[in-house]
Image (cartoon, rainbow, N blue to C red):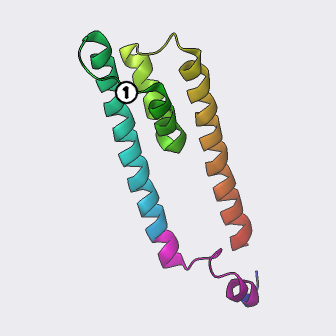
Amino acid sequence: MSFTTFAVFPAVFPTFAAAAWLTNAFWIYLGVVALASILLTCYDKLAAKGEKARRIPEASLMWLGAIGGALPMFIMMQLIRHKTQHKKFMIGLPLLILLHIALVVLYFWLRHKLAA
């Protein structure tokens, strides 16, 4: 990769300091999303047992899974046996997990290709 490539596309090739900051921010983001997905899944399970508690809409849970909380949500649903009969979650969340894995692999592959 030549210097002109970095000069032409500065937004695509951030400096290493910016890349390190983005990496840290990414892990913090994933931690927050994972915690939120676990807590909301547990809350929805408790609300399902009680009659007066407000439930979390299924669409909201799926969106939370789509933005990065699919794996912790799927594991928590299996542990507490919540929504395990719903095909939307038992098929959708594993598909989202595979998508997330593919995106991470693509990220590292592109990072390796661009660094070479």
- Residue at 62% x, 77% y: name it: 11
Q: Is residue 67 above or below residue 44?
A: below
- Residue at 74% x, 84% y: name it: 5
Give the side of residue 26 with respect to residue 36, left or right. right
> Residue 103: horizontal and vertical position, in percent?
64, 49
Magenta segment: 4-20
- Which is nearer the eye, 40 or 21? 40
- Which is nearer the eye, 112 or 56? 56
Q: Residue 92 falls in which quadrant of the image?
A: top right
Q: Which quarter of the image is occupied by the N terminus?
A: bottom right
| Type of amino acid under label 1 | Ile
> Residue 96: horizontal and vertical position, in percent?
60, 35
Sort mark 1 into few (<14), some (14-19) or many (20+) by Cα contacts within 10 Å. some
Query: Which type of secondary structure does the marked residue at label 1 adopt?
Result: loop
- Which is nearer the eye, 45 or 55? 55
Q: Is residue 11 magenta?
A: yes
Residue behind mark 1: 56
Give the side of residue 52 with respect to residue 36, left or right. left
